[in-house]
Amino acid sequence: MTPKRVALLVVLLLFAVFVAQNAQVVEVRFLFWKTHASRSLVLLGTLAVGLIAGFFSGWALKKKRRSSVKGNS
């Protein structure tokens, strides 16, 4: 396994422990929307949104770099 994968697994393990220890129900407010949810679900949702945003921003950056390299050739 690469060091990058090991680091990812360690971070995910630590995050899983953190989520398991924060299972209380909390109030979530966003703009005019308000609900109650488990803090664990809120944390997992935030992680998912962050991972998706990171994936797409990295993908867009790679695509932009490829198109600029092709344009310079």
Image: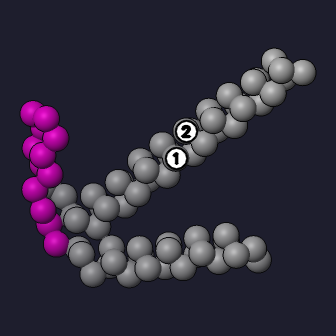
The residue shown at (50%, 72%) is 12
Packing grade of label 2 (10 A; few <14, some 14-19, many >=20) is few
Dividing the picture into quarters, in which one does residue 25 lie? bottom left
Q: Position of residue 62 (x, y in %)?
A: 69, 37
Give the total number of marks visible in the rendering. 2
Q: Residue 62 vs residue 21: left or right?
A: right
Q: Residue 14 vs residue 71: left or right?
A: left
Label 2 – label 1 distance at C-alpha? 5 Å
Cβ–Cβ under 8 Å for marks 2 and 1: yes
Residue 31 lies in the magenta stretch: yes
Name the disc covering residue 13, or none.
none
Dividing the picture into quarters, in which one does residue 10 lie? bottom right
The residue shown at (23%, 74%) is 23
Q: Farthest residue to the front: give it.
A: 72
Q: How is the image coloured?
A: one colour
Q: Is residue 37 above or below residue 6?
A: above
The residue shown at (27%, 81%) is 21
Element type at marker 2? Answer: helix
Q: Amino acid at mark 2?
A: Ser
Residue that numbered label 1 is attached to: 54
Q: Position of residue 32 (x, y in %)?
A: 9, 33
Q: Is residue 72 above or below residue 1?
A: above
Q: Amino acid at mark 1?
A: Gly
Residue that numbered label 2 is attached to: 57
Q: Residue 29 vs residue 2: left or right?
A: left
Q: Position of residue 8 (x, y in %)?
A: 58, 70
Q: Which residues are magenta?
A: 24-35
The residue shown at (16%, 41%) is 30
